[in-house]
Amino acid sequence: MDERIPVTRPVAHGTAKLLPDIDRKGAWLLTVNDAPQSYVDLDAPTHLEFEYARRLGHVLDTLAEPGRPLDVLHLGGGALTMPRYLAATRPGSRQDVVEADRGLIDLINEHVPVPDDAGVRLHAADARAWLESESAAADSVDVLIADVFGGSRVPAHLTSVAYAREAERVLRDDGVYLANLADTAPFAFLRSQLATFSTVFEELALIAEPGVLRGRRFGNAILVAAHHPVDTTTLARRTASDAFPARIEHGAALRDFMGDAQPVRDANAVPSPEPPDGAFSIG
C-alpha cells in the first residue's frame, strides 16, 4: 500500500502541491496552481515523464560522449528533474540551480531532496540577477538550461538581447543554451525569441511536437542555441522515434519560421503568452 500523502504549501506564485503517483512507487508530480510543473521519480531519475523534459534529455545526451561529466547551470528549479537526470547519466557533473522561489526550494528539500553527493547546489535568487552577478563567472559552464516560469509565463526580463548576452557570457566556447518556451500560432513570442538569440548565437534549433509547430495547439518548444553546429541528425532521429514524437527545425526552415521578427530589447520585453484555459492543468 502506498502510504505517501499529498503535500500542499503556499509559494511565491500561488499554491504548490506534491502529489504521489500511485502507479510509480517513488514518483511525484509537482503542480503550482494545479498546473503541472515537474515530475520526478526518486527511484528512477532517468525517467522523464513530461514531453519537454524528454526533449531536453535528448539534447543533453548528444552534447558529449556518454557519461562524461558536464558543468551545468539551471535557471529555474521546479522539482529538479533535469539535475537529477544529469546526476544519474553523467555522474560527477557540477550543477548549480537558481530558483527565485524560496518556498518551492524548501518544499523540494523537505520532501523530495536531491542526494547530498549528487553535485547539485541550490541558490535562491532571480535568474537574471544571478547571471549578472559575480556568482556567474564567464566561460564557466558547458550547458545553461532555462526553464523559468513566473506562474505559467516566461518572465519578460528573461527574453531580451541583454539577457541572451549574459547567458552567452557564462557559456564556454563550445557550450549550449537550452530553453523551455511555450507559445501557439501566430508565434509572436517564439519568433521573437529566435530573432533575439540569433543576434548572439550562430546556430539555432527548435524542437516541438508537430501539432504545436503547425499552430494547432498551445505547447512547449525547446530552443537550442550554440556557436557550433548542433547534431540535428541525431536529434531528429531520437525525437521522431520518441514515445512523444517531435520535430526539429533548423537552418533555412527555421529562418523561414522566424520571418521578419525583431530582437527583443529590455525596454519592450513582455512575458510569454498566457496559456489558454486547460492547456496544462490537471484534474
Image (cartoon, rainbow, N blue to C red):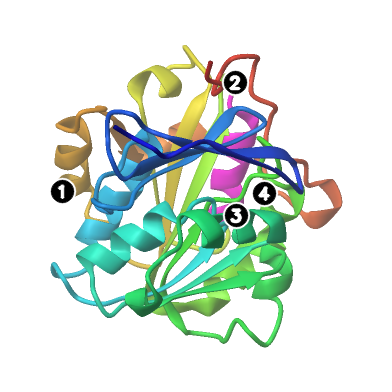
Taking the spot 57% from the left edge, 68% from the top edge, the residue there is 167
Disc 4 secondary structure class: loop
The circle drawn on residue 107 is: 3
- 12 sits left or right of 56 in the view: right
Q: Amino acid at mark 2?
A: Pro
Please give the residue where the numbered disc 4 appears in the rendered image. Answer: 263
Q: CA distance from mark 1 to mark 4?
A: 29 Å
Q: Residue 9, can we see it?
A: yes
Q: Is residue 7 above or below residue 141?
A: above
Mark closer to the chain start, 2 or 3: 3
Q: Amino acid at mark 4?
A: Pro
Q: Is residue 20 above or below residue 266?
A: above
Q: Which residues are magenta?
A: 187-198
Q: Given this view, does label 1 or label 4 mark the residue nearer the observer?
A: 1
Q: Amino acid at mark 3?
A: Leu
Q: Is residue 168 above or below residue 206?
A: below
Q: Residue 29: image x %, image y %?
A: 45, 37
